[in-house]
Amino acid sequence: MSDAAAPAMLSAPHAAQARWVGFKTIIVREFDRIIRIWGQTVVPSAVTATLYFVIFGALIGRRIGSMGGVGYMQFIAPGLIMMAVITNSYANVVSSFFGAKFSKHVEEMLVSPLPNWVIVTGYVGGGVVRGLLVGAVVTVISLLFAKLSIHHFAIIVGAVLLTAIVFSLGGFLNAMFAKNFEQVNWIPSFVLTPLTYFGGVFFSISLLPNWAQQLSYANPILHMVNAFRYGFLGTSDVNIALAFTLMLAFAVVMFAIAVMLMNRGVGMRE
């Protein structure tokens, strides 16, 4: 049902209530799904982060020494937290929404009085919940290996929320265009993973030659990771204001595209 048709059937208060109930239902369902299969949603990132700390932090980090003026373990901790947020926000939405398409129960939402922007917001909210939940778990693990102090709390919260929103929207767009489960994995495997590893999680781009540094600035994950790191350590390879501008711009543009594609029925009518 189109966004224009819903208000014709419901008064404004009832329409607002229906939208809130629909949004809340999607969020609760996504949260229940995350908790129900916690062995697939939470544990892998916790184990991966622990291995990174042991191998890169404890073993290799001893030879590296300091990075960006702090111990190597402290340096990679914010990057590993952000990496968990990125991968889990994306994975939750792409798998959940594609599953809804595959099993056809997304059609129940499309014929309901819910506007498409509420559906998009609900799935993105579910991705944010998983990203923040897993990020919190990885943060606890990080504290076992490194001492993290809070340099700027508002920047930490803003960076992690915007990053989770951006990659949840990315997962939604991937799910809309995907026609099979193989296509669901293309973007994470061939785009997301390389950008994450070259996004300053394990090293400062100041170590790179000038041409590589300039190339790295085109990687949005570099800006996200460094903004988040600045909130903890007070050091960054990028301009923080620019980083937040990029994250906000990505979030707004991707949300608008997702709603527009939903209104056109892209990926819904095959």
Image (cartoon, grey):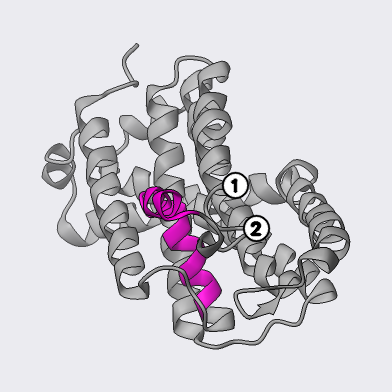
Identity of the residue drawn at 75% across and 70% down: 73
* Image quarter of the C terminus: top left
Q: Is residue 21 left or right of residue 241?
A: right
Q: Position of residue 250 (x, y in %)?
A: 30, 52
Work out whether residue 99 can be spotted. Answer: no
Q: Position of residue 132 (x, y in %)?
A: 59, 62
Q: Residues within 10 Å of mark 1 (few under 14, many from 20)?
A: some
Q: Which residues are magenta?
A: 209-230
Q: Which residue is mark 2?
A: 202
Q: Which mark is residue 197?
A: 1
Does label 1 or label 2 sit earlier along the sequence? Answer: 1
Q: Position of residue 157 (x, y in %)?
A: 49, 75
Residue at far front of view: 209
Picture quadrant where residue 138 is located: bottom right
Q: Amino acid at mark 2?
A: Phe
Work out whether residue 66 can be spotted. Answer: yes
What's the magenta bit mostly, secondary-structure-wise?
helix
Identity of the residue drawn at 55% across and 34% down: 188
